[in-house]
Image (cartoon, rainbow, N blue to C red):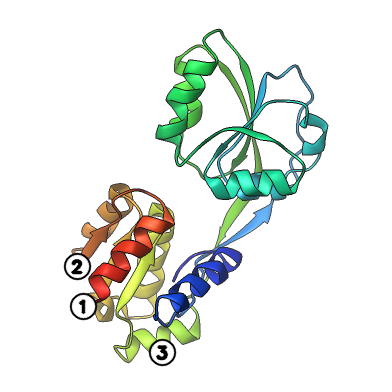
Amino acid sequence: MLRATDDAARTADRLRAIGLIPVLSPVLEIAATGAQLPQGAYDALLASSAKGIELARGAEAFKALPFHAVGERTAHAARAHGFHPDIVAGNAEAILPLLLERYQRPAHFLYLAGRDRQQTLEAGLKAAGHRVAAVEVYEARTAKALSQEAVDAIAAGEIDAVLHYSRRSAEIFITLAKGAGILEKTRDALHVALSQEVAQRLLCENIPNVGVAERPDEDHLLELLARRSI
């Protein structure tokens, strides 16, 4: 599993619960950028990751604003920090029409964002005439190598499945696995991708056994993994 450490630990518990043995090798580590949130007259606060809430400096000054979250985990983190999530949806494509329905006049959004992110949400809002102040409050730093446990398990042919949560993490995995000389050893494994975009990067490497979650969330990814692992 390639998720950042905190996320990987939570997913590992879920894998054990369905009888699978996780091998962790985070290829990204999440860190705060220290960016300051600009003061201003905003109509709402947005976040697409729990890290946006957990690592933002000075976000408490905006608790009076309506808060909208991509993902239930983001909403949960917001509640833990004293916010009251209003609109919550599973991904940017799902939340965008809900926001456009709510804000039919030009609005100004403060977006607690990551440095490397998809542009779907802010691009869609801007296209509808809204303003978005996207502040990069966290970044994902690239690991220099796969974990030794993962390298040894892959080399020994002991890995049955690899979980891919983002295009970037899939790209890093491919680079690191090639560098360690073990990418070929993963070709017989099931590669489970969170979305078609993630899967496309794997298919470009001619990885033959790629499964795509029915919906881009962990519940559906693990559901697919459990089904294909039987």
Name the element at disc 1. loop
Instruction: Give coordinates of residue 181: x percent, y percent.
Output: 33, 81
Residue drawn at x 48%, y 30% as measured from the top left: 121
Instruction: Give coordinates of residue 227: x percent, y percent.
Output: 26, 68
**Which residue extends farthest top?**
105
Residue 152 has which mark? 3
Tag 2: amino acid: Asn
Mark 1 vs 2: CB contact within 8 A: yes
How packed mark 3 is, by other alpha carbons closer than 10 Å (few <14, some 14-19, many 20 or more), is: some
Q: Is residue 54 left or right of residue 91?
A: right
Residue at the spot of label 2? 209
CA separation in Å, label 1 and label 2: 7 Å
Instruction: Give coordinates of residue 206: x percent, y percent.
Output: 18, 63
Quick check: can you spot residue 129? yes
Residue drawn at x 42%, y 83% as measured from the top left: 21
Instruction: Give coordinates of residue 132: x percent, y percent.
Output: 59, 23
Tag 3: amino acid: Asp
Q: How many marks?
A: 3
Residue at the spot of label 1? 188
